Amino acid sequence: MAPKFQKGPDLKRFMDKKLKFSINGNRKITGTLRGYDAFLNVALEEAEFLNNGEYLGTIVIRGNSIIQFEGIERISKTAAAAAAAAAVVAS
């Protein structure tokens, strides 16, 4: 039996970090993560295509078009631990 409530993705440690997304159509986009939701829809600032360098500005990428993403900036373990502690305190 499937659980009644599924948790969304935990991207807190990637907030305000520069990420690279591979999306449908062999497109690659970089930008700073500003928000996300349970469906992995993401909001990026200062986004641009890596394929042709076209500047996109602030965009939203629909979650089902994301194939993979990776951090361009280093994500420190202390930042990840702080985000996890904040999540525990908030709940």
Image (cartoon, rainbow, N blue to C red):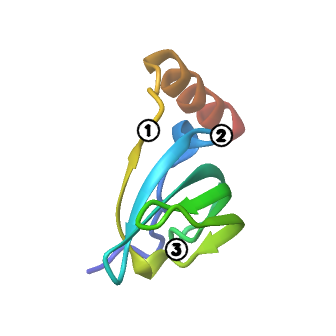
Q: Which mark is residue 16?
A: 2
Measure how far apart labels 2 and 1 are at the Cα level.
11 Å
Count of marks overlaid on the render: 3
In the figure, 49 relative to 26: above or below? above
Quarter occupied by residue 51: bottom left
- Nearer to us of marks 2 and 3 is 2
Label 2 vs 3, first from the N-terminus: 2
Q: Amino acid at mark 2?
A: Asp
Kindly identify which residue carries mark 3.
39
**Nearest the camera: 33 or 58?**
58
Q: Residue at x 47, y 58 (%)?
A: 9
- Circle 3: element type: loop
- Nearer to us of marks 2 and 1 is 1
Label 3 vs 1, first from the N-terminus: 3
In the figure, 87 relative to 4: above or below? above
Category of crowding for the residue at label 1, using alpha-carbon neighbours closer than 10 angstroms: few (below 14), some (14–19), many (at least 20):
few
- Circle 2: element type: loop
- Nearer to us of marks 3 and 1 is 1
Q: Amino acid at mark 1?
A: Ile
Category of crowding for the residue at label 3, using alpha-carbon neighbours closer than 10 angstroms: few (below 14), some (14–19), many (at least 20):
few
Find residue 7 and report its horizontal and vertical position in percent. 47, 62
Find residue 91 and report its horizontal and vertical position in percent. 66, 42
In the figure, 83 relative to 24: above or below? above
Q: Which mark is residue 72?
A: 1
